[in-house]
Amino acid sequence: MKLIKRPLFTLSMALLLLLSSCATLQQGMELSPVKFTFDRVSSVRVAGIDLMNIHEINELNMFQIARATLAVSRESLPLDLTVHLKTENPMINQIAATLVSMDWTLMLDGRETISGTLNERITLPAGEAQSIPLKLSLNMFEYFNEKNALDMLDLALAFAGSGGSVPEGVALRIRPTISTPFGPMTYKEMLIEPHAH
């Protein structure tokens, strides 16, 4: 009798494990997506000029304006800024996810500018929000050469004069890849805009 029952017991255990694995896999397939929104801007420099405490062009001194004008005359007006993205892994997921990479493209006034890839493993615990800094650098002259130095400075000041919030006209196209216990998930490309929910 024992020899007959043992295979039945083994088969029953195998079926239970299979059902448990299927239930776990189904849970993985139903994970709520991690949310990405703009958080803030923490640093803005143009042609080496720190703009974070400057709100209008008339607050620039003559040396700063001359420096920007000289940079434009050389067809180079570097804009360096740090934009923070807020990520939220919904509590309903009950498991941590890991951001393993993210392709991004910066849009200014509807114009596609620079692109890149964030290759950094960032753990995203369930139910917690995290801020991910993106350090961006571009030559404004390459994308806005129809503007003069003051116009480009005014555009750069839109970042600095917004109290750390991301101004209108700025957007990021992103395509993140998230690692989960159930395997990697690459999201469809999404557009992140100020005040978008």
Image (spheres, grey):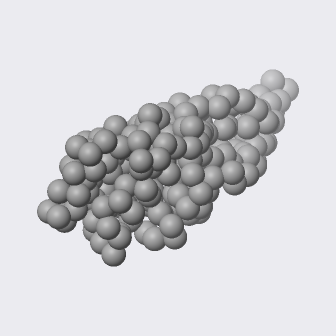
Residue 112 pos. (x, y %): 43, 69
Residue 124 pos. (x, y %): 59, 32
User: Position of 60 compared to 128: left or right?
Assistant: left
User: Position of 104 compared to 60: left or right?
Assistant: right
Q: Is residue 121 visible?
A: no
Q: Is residue 169 above or below residue 93?
A: below
Q: Quadrant of residue 151?
A: bottom left
Q: Quadrant of residue 53?
A: top left
Residue 187 pos. (x, y %): 58, 57
Q: Is residue 83 above or below residue 150?
A: above
Give the residue drawn at x 22%, y 51%: 66
Nearer to the camera, 171 or 178: 171
Residue located farthest toward the left when viewing the structure as drawn: 74
Nearer to the camera, 148 or 117: 148
Give the residue drawn at x 77%, y 28%: 6
Q: Quadrant of residue 19?
A: top right
Residue 59 pos. (x, y %): 41, 42
Give the residue drawn at x 73%, y 37%: 90
Tally of numbered tags: 0
User: Position of 117 compared to 19: left or right?
Assistant: left
Q: Is residue 148 above or below residue 171?
A: below
Q: Is residue 73 visible?
A: yes
User: Position of 121 compared to 46: left or right?
Assistant: right
